[in-house]
Amino acid sequence: MGSLPSPHLPKPWISTPLIESAALSKAAGCRIFLKLENLQPAASFKSRGIGNLIRHALLTHPTPHLTHFYSSSGGNAGLACVTAAHSLGRPATVVVPMTTKPLM
C-alpha cells in the first residue's frame, strides 16, 4: 500500500475576486456582484468542483501515487480535470465524445 499524501496537499483552484458591476447594479436597482471564475486555472468555475474531487481522491485513495484520472468531456470539465491533476502531479486523460462540435 502507498502512503497517503499530506493533508496539506495544495488546492488546484484559486480564490477569485468579486467585483461590483455598476451597469448591472443600475439596471437592477440593487447591487450586483460578479465572481470572476474565468481567472481560475482552467478558466472556469469547474476548477473548484473538479479540483476538489481530484484533491479529495488523492487524500483518501489507498495508493494515490498510482491514481490516473479520466474525464469524458467536450469542454471545460475536461480542461479542469487535466489542469487539476497536472498541478497535483498526477496524469489525466480526457475522452472527447464524438458528438462534440469541432469548434469547442
Image (tube, helix red, strand yellow):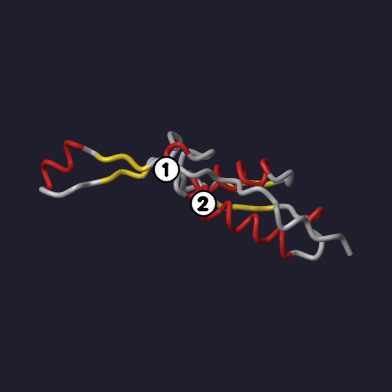
Could you tell me how many numbered marks the image carries?
Answer: 2
The residue where tag 1 is placed is 37
SS for dot 1: helix
Coordinates of residue 63 in the picture (x, y in percent): 82, 61
Q: Residue at x 60, y 41 (%)?
A: 83
Q: Residue at x 66, y 48 (%)?
A: 10
Q: Dot 2 surroundings within 10 Å: few (below 14), some, or many (20 or more)? A: many
Q: Nearer the viewer, residue 70 or 32?
A: 32
Q: Quadrant of residue 13?
A: top right
Coordinates of residue 40 in the picture (x, y in percent): 49, 40
Q: Is residue 54 left or right of residue 96?
A: right
Q: Quadrant of residue 38?
A: top left
The residue where tag 2 is placed is 48
- Where is the C terminus found, in terms of image quarters? top left
Coordinates of residue 86 in the picture (x, y in percent): 68, 41
Q: Nearer the viewer, residue 17 or 74?
A: 17
How far apart are the two marked residues, 1 and 2, measured between alpha carbons? 9 Å
Task: Say which amino acid is labelled 1.
Answer: Glu
Q: Residue at x 46, y 44 (%)?
A: 100
Farthest residue to the right: give it: 1
Q: Residue at x 38, y 40 (%)?
A: 36
- Where is the N terminus found, in terms of image quarters? bottom right
Coordinates of residue 67 in the picture (x, y in percent): 76, 55
The reply to whether dot 1 and dot 2 touch (C-beta < 8 Å) is: yes
Farthest residue to the top: give it: 103
Q: Dot 1 surroundings within 10 Å: few (below 14), some, or many (20 or more)? A: many
Task: Say which amino acid is labelled 2.
Answer: Arg
Q: Nearer the viewer, residue 19 or 56?
A: 19
Q: Is residue 9 left or right of residue 78?
A: right
SS for dot 2: helix
* Mark 1 or 2, nearer chain start: 1
